[in-house]
């Protein structure tokens, strides 16, 4: 059986590894337009500031593929899929490639919002860039050097956008982040934690503009800045757009596979065409796309089993989960992190510890005593507990201990100050704090054992 995988991203590469684990005999071939074996995109911005080298980024060297007996074809572009003949037409190669099973790990491309001049200046390489590959990094580095760029704007306050801004700042450019939403990391953080992160980023000398819509990129021959909705202009020599992703579907669409926002798949990650599967950023399941590494990893196991005829596991979607470093600070975000007010009234409970002085934020979200989500920022010692208890009933006393939240009791009247439900930690209350019940001083409160 010959299995061909188009794409050597995280989903494509780990699908190949999982197939080999399940089947020692199958012939596995990966085809990719990339010039390099599988590398992690998370650390791409560090290539710009020369904190890492290309070799540092590459996770699996050529020997890994040889040992797994996986044929890797770099610099190779698939022009057309013919499902009827089970063949692939390859650019610059006369003979088609045959397959028994085909896996589409086509990934995604950076989303470019409808900003005037953005696409034009990007295509002409006049100072507008997106970051998705090693080649993008090299082009950005080269532009900064040749144009002697001094000011940069990053449009997008997501994970990659913030790390990109950090590394651009480390390359000695005056750096501004412009985010459409009213907080940074809108998918991973709530407003309070997002505000804490903003203050930390600004303390490093990076400007942050929130709730801002970029309407136009200014400049004729090259970039001179941006104009926001409302008329404000910000100067820049280079503009980097990190505003989400779009699933890559053209190849599947041209082969008449069912597509929508992504390539439509069923619970076994099968497409509408027999013996063609899809995985990773390019797929759509139950009207949803994911675009996160945990989803790619989970899907790669399911699609591998499906390809080799072991359809035992059904895909049910992936709980949003991120554990990473943002500007040197540990962050874990998992599940539901910000229930709406309407949801909170229906059995939701939030336990939270916000220590702004130490830039530490811990929040656990429960519904009917089950752990549904968490944010751990600046202190992630509770990661293993959170991961193991997701969707399970948890003990309130255990959670308080985990978050280091305490109840303080006024020795005069018995009034409680419960840190789990108060906005301010007891230690951060002003010295002149008075008991709201008996007007006793702060020192009359003692921690409950």
Image (cartoon, rainbow, N blue to C red):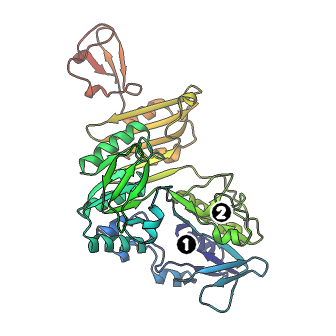
Say few, some or many: other residues with alpha carbon within 10 Å of mark 2 (under 14 / 14 to 19 / 20 or more): many
Q: Is residue 175 above or below residue 345?
A: below
Which residue ends up furthest to the bottom in the rendered image? Answer: 94
Which residue is located at x 59 percent, y 79 percent?
Answer: 30
Q: Which residue lies under the disc numbered 1?
A: 13
Identify which residue, 66 or 177, lies in the foreground.
177
- Residue 87 percent across, percent down from the top left: 72, 82
Left or right: where does residue 368 sit relative to residue 201? right
Which residue is located at x 38 percent, y 44 percent?
Answer: 210
Name which of mark 1 and mark 2 comes first in the sequence. Answer: 1
Which residue ends up furthest to the front in the rendered image? Answer: 220
> Where on the picture, by quarter, is residue 301?
bottom right
Left or right: where does residue 340 sit relative to residue 276? left
- Residue 70 percent across, percent down from the top left: 57, 82
Q: Which residue lies under the disc numbered 2?
A: 302
Separation (CA) of disc 1 from disc 2? 14 Å
Check whether the beta carbons of the residues at disc 1 and disc 2 lie within 8 A of each other.
no
Give the quarter of the figure containing the N terminus.
Answer: bottom right
Q: How many marks?
A: 2
Q: Is residue 293 above or below residue 364?
A: below
- Residue 442 percent across, percent down from the top left: 24, 17
- Residue 69 percent across, percent down from the top left: 57, 83
SS state under label 2: helix
Residue 325: image tag: none
Identify which residue, 202 or 20, lies in the foreground.
202
Identify which residue, 142 or 284, lies in the foreground.
142
Q: Is residue 275 visible to us here? A: yes
Say few, some or many: other residues with alpha carbon within 10 Å of mark 1 (under 14 / 14 to 19 / 20 or more): many
Say which of marks 1 and 2 sits in front.
1
Q: Is residue 1 visible to us here? A: no
Q: Is residue 319 above or below residue 255?
A: above
């Amino acid at each position: 059986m010959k299995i061909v995988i188009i794409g050597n991203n995280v989903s494509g590469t780990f699908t190949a590894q999982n197939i080999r684990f399940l089947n020692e005999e199958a012939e596995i071939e990966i085809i990719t337009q990339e010039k390099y074996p599988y590398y992690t995109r998370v650390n791409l911005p560090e290539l710009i500031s020369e904190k890492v080298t290309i070799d540092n980024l590459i996770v699996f060297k050529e020997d890994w593929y040889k040992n797994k007996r996986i044929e890797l074809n770099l610099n190779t572009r698939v022009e057309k899929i013919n499902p009827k003949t089970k063949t692939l037409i390859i650019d610059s190669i006369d003979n088609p490639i045959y397959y028994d099973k085909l896996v589409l790990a086509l990934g995604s491309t950076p989303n470019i919002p409808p900003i005037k001049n953005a696409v034009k200046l990007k295509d002409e390489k006049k100072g507008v860039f997106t970051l998705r590959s090693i080649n993008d990094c090299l082009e950005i580095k080269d532009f900064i050097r040749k144009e002697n760029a001094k000011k940069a704007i990053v449009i997008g306050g997501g994970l990659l956008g913030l790390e990109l801004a950090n590394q651009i700042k480390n390359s000695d450019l005056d750096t501004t982040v412009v985010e459409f939403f009213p907080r940074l990391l809108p998918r991973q953080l709530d407003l309070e934690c997002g505000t804490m992160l903003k203050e930390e980023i600004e303390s490093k000398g990076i400007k942050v503009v929130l709730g801002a819509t970029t309407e136009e990129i200014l400049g004729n021959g090259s970039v001179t800045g941006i104009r926001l909705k409302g008329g404000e202009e910000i100067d820049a020599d280079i503009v980097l757009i990190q505003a989400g992703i779009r699933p890559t579907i053209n190849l599947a669409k041209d082969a008449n596979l069912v597509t929508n926002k992504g390539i439509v798949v069923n619970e076994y990650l099968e497409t509408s065409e027999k013996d063609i599967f899809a995985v990773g950023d390019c797929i759509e399941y139950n009207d949803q796309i994911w675009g996160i590494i945990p989803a790619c990893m989970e899907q790669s196991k399911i699609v591998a089993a499906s390809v080799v005829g072991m359809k035992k596991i059904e895909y049910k979607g992936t709980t949003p989960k991120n554990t990473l470093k943002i500007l040197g600070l540990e962050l874990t975000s998992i599940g539901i992190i910000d229930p709406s007010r309407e949801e909170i009234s229906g059995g939701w409970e939030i336990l939270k510890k916000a220590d702004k002085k130490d830039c530490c934020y811990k929040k656990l979200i429960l519904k009917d005593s089950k752990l549904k989500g968490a944010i751990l920022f600046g202190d992630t010692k509770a990661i293993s507990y959170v991961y193991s208890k997701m969707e399970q009933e948890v003990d309130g006393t255990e959670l308080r201990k985990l978050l280091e939240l305490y109840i303080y009791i006024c020795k005069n009247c018995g009034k409680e100050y419960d840190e789990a439900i108060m906005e301010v930690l007891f230690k951060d209350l002003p010295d002149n704090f008075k008991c709201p019940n008996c007007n006793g001083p702060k020192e009359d409160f003692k921690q409950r054992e």
